[in-house]
Image (cartoon, rainbow, N blue to C red):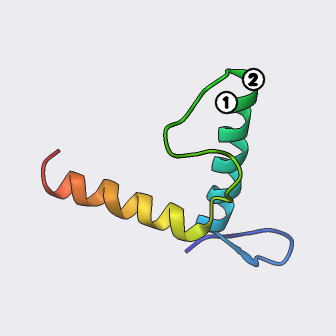
Amino acid sequence: MPRFGDNDEQTLFEFQAVRMRSYMQKRVIEDNLAPKYYTGDRKITAGHVARYYGACMAEMIMGN
């Protein structure tokens, strides 16, 4: 799996989690988005990203 950061310490999912949180904060603040399940007080983690990709893959396998 690709690694990022100064010493290649950050995994791909950790890298994407930081970007997802930044994007969600931008949308909430600048675009007045009101997501149903994301309130901004919880941190998006690498585990959340992995679970999201797993759900997307499961839907693709099922033909959705």
Determine contact: label 1, label 2, CB under 8 Å: yes
- Asked if 49 appears above or below 64 in the picture, the reply is below
Residue situated furthest right in the rendering: 6
x then y, percent, for residue 21? 68, 49
Q: Mark number for residue 41? A: none
Seen at 59% across and 68% down, the residue is 46
Occupied quadrant, residue 33: top right
Q: Mark number for residue 30? A: 2
Front-most of residues 1 and 15: 15
* Residue where numbered disc 1 is placed: 27
Occupied quadrant, residue 16: bottom right
Seen at 52% across and 64% down, the residue is 48
x then y, percent, for residue 15? 68, 61
The crowding category of the residue bearing disc 2, from other C-alpha atoms within 10 Å (few below 14, some 14 to 19, many at least 20), is few
The quadrant of the image that shows the C terminus is: top left
x then y, percent, for residue 59? 23, 53
SS state under label 1: helix
- Asked if 61 appears above or below 40 in the picture, the reply is below
Seen at 67% across and 30% down, the residue is 27
- Asked if 24 appears above or below 58 in the picture, the reply is above
Residue situated furthest left in the rendering: 63
Occupied quadrant, residue 54: bottom left
Callout 2 amino acid: Glu
The quadrant of the image that shows the N terminus is: bottom right
Q: CA distance from mark 1 to mark 2?
A: 5 Å
Callout 1 amino acid: Arg
